[in-house]
Amino acid sequence: MRWLHRRPVRLVPIGFAVAILLGTVVLMLPAATSQQRYTPFMTALFTATSAVSVTGLAVVDTPNYWTGFGLAMITVLTQIGGLGILTGATLVILAVARRLGLRNRLLVQAETAEFGLGDVRRLLVRIAATSLICEAVITALLTLRLWGRYDYPFGRALWSGVFHAVQSFNNGGFALYTDNLIGFSPDPWLTLPLALGSIIGGLGFPALFEAVREWRHPAGWAVATKLTVWGSVALLLLGFLALLAAEWSNPHTLGIHSWPERILIAFTQNAFIRTGGFNVVDIDALDEESVPIIIALMFIGGGSASTAGGIKVSTFFLLAFVIWAELRGEPDVTIGHRRVATASQRQALTVALLGVALVVAGTVALILLTEGVPYHAALFEVTSAFTTTGLSLGVAAELPDSAQLALIVLMYIGRVGPLTLGSALALNTRRRLYRYPEEQPIVG
């Protein structure tokens, strides 16, 4: 195990692979399906990967295909996937910090706030406690609403509350209803708690802890926290306005509701877009103008070390600051009176470009492996899988096994890839004792 000790970042992909394989075996059991027969391997593998990667894509009708045992297993796998990546991120960051030397360790500690170099156990307990408390609050709100307003038996209301609370905070997206949450879309007492859970879970604990602790002094937040929090606020606002404008008159989505309900549904759906995975409108009925908006928001994703996927909010807005500095001819990239290290800029560019390459390659592969899938539908499904969002135009269930396998690989890479890549880049940082002569090639 010496190789694992030297490269602790390998624990993350290995741990997730083991969880997926174990989940696949359990979901293949006859007790997991309502048909009481062995689940096909590809169906079980796709569902287990989707749950562990907290994606929410499904190739079967979730509430009718799986038994209570199968749904409970999906819940457990989602919880493992959500908490696993958070605790894994914590441990990897701490391990990376110890490998960077004292000076860089202090820089890491300053920039990651709560990810200190001391009490790891206290930090992990705090992460787990925060997750469980948020899920418990959401569960209570949903249970009371389903029990009191929709006349659910208390046991059924409690189970539905627990299931959807876990999916919400972990940005899973599985639902106990064939139409997902469309039937509850005008009800703010159900949709808003789920939307808030997705937003909090998608921020990431480094940003969340510092923002809560220093809420009176946002100017003193670390650069990563500023990018994540204010970037998330900006995306929530811009995405909400764009989706509201695009779908306002669509009779198949927002157009059939009153104007207060349209505002509510547009806000909650926008909150679920950046990896939440639930849908309160029929995604397949969206206007063409909405599809590129959703693809862009899915690709950006949520915060670092969160339950969300994508290239991350901090990566996207850091690159925006890089572009702005270049357009102004500034020698340095500055955010909040702090100069951003060149290494961080290169890492952000690497993550973003590799993300684009994977989405493009996945889209081409899906088109080649499938007959008759429109380009925009293939791009949508691939982006949803890579960013672990879970929204779908209804294509995934109709794909052949080879195309579903491609989505499985994308879900796995999208879940463990950004953390693994970022940690590998940090660990691979080295300093040369010499520099070559400089030359400026033509750009543009």
Image (spheres, rainbow, N blue to C red):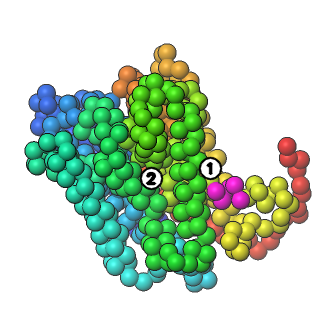
Quadrant of the rendering where the C terminus is positioned = top right
Up the image or down, 169 lies above or below 104; here it is: above
**Mark number, residue 352:** 1
Residue 308's disc is 2
| Numbered circle sitting on residue 144 | none
Task: Indicate left or right for 405 with 71 as reference.
Answer: right
Please state the extent of the stretch shown in magenta in the rendering.
Answer: 317-321
Was residue 318 drawn as part of the magenta stretch in this picture?
A: yes
How many other residues sit within 10 Å of disc 2, few (<14), some (14-19) or many (≥20)?
many
Task: Please name the amino acid that badge 2 sits on.
Answer: Ala
3D distance between C-alphas at marks 2 and 1 = 16 Å
Q: Secondary structure at mark 1?
A: helix
- Label 1 packing within 10 angstroms: few (<14), some (14-19), many (20+): many
Q: Earlier in the sequence, mark 2 or mark 1?
A: 2
The number of discs equals 2
Please state the horizontal and vertical placement of residue 280, each as a whole percent of the image: 38, 37
Identify which residue is drawn at 88% across, 50% down: 441
CB atoms at circles 2 and 1 under 8 Å apart? Answer: no
Q: Is residue 261 left or right of residue 301?
A: left
Identity of the residue drawn at 46% across and 77% down? 213
